[in-house]
Image (spheres, helix red, strand yellow):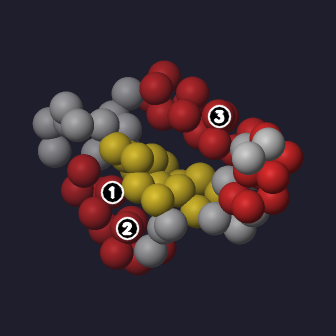
Amino acid sequence: MSEEQLINHCTQKTVLVVEDSPVQAFAMIQLLEQRGLNVLCAPDGSVGVAMAKESRPDLLIFDIQMPE
């Protein structure tokens, strides 16, 4: 799949990034938005769970070493 096809396929898809490092979260958000995805971000697992229940994203990306 070409990058253009991928961007067209991803349009209107939502990704929830759960990341406690602001630097890592920023990098991930920039990368995903450049590919045409709508991105939500949560700073910890508790907020991430609540956001996932409310927004029902198409994909979750999360840090596996968070304190909460």
Between the C-alphas of marks 1 and 3, the distance is 19 Å
Q: Marks 1 and 3: CB-CB under 8 Å?
A: no
Image point 65% across, 34% down: which residue? Answer: 31
* Other-residue count near label 2 (Cα within 10 Å), few / some / many at <14 / 14–19 / ≥20: some
Q: Which mark is residue 31?
A: 3
Label located before the other in sequence (2 or 3): 3
Q: Residue 19: give x, y in percent of width and height.
A: 37, 38
> Residue 68: which numbered mark, if any?
none
Q: Name the residue rendered at 39%, 66% in the picture.
A: 51
Q: Position of residue 26 (x, y in %)?
A: 56, 31
Distance in Å between CA atoms under marks 2 and 1: 6 Å
Q: Quadrant of the C terminus?
A: top left
Q: Position of residue 48 (x, y in %)?
A: 33, 57
Q: Which residue is identified by label 2? A: 52
Q: Give the class, few, some or many, for how many residues have Cα within 10 Å of label 3's Cα (few <14, many ≥20).
A: few
Where does residue 58 sit, x and y in percent of width and height?
50, 66
**At numbered mark 1, what does the secondary structure look like: helix, strand or loop?**
helix
Mark 3 lies on a secondary structure that is helix
* Callout 1 amino acid: Gly
In the picture provided, is 22 more to the left or to the right than 28?
left
* Looking at the image, residue 7 lies above or below residue 20: below
Amino acid marked by disc 3: Leu
Asked whether 32 or 54 is in front, the reply is: 32
Tell me whether circle 2 and circle 3 mark residues in contact (CB < 8 Å).
no
Please tell me which residue lies in front, 68 or 9.
Answer: 9
Examine the rendered structure and indicate whether residue 43 appears above or below residue 30.
Answer: below
Distance between the alpha carbons at the discs numbered 2 and 3: 20 Å
In the orientation shown, which residue stands out farthest toward the top? 23
Say which residue label 1 marks: 48
Question: Which residue is at the far right?
Answer: 4
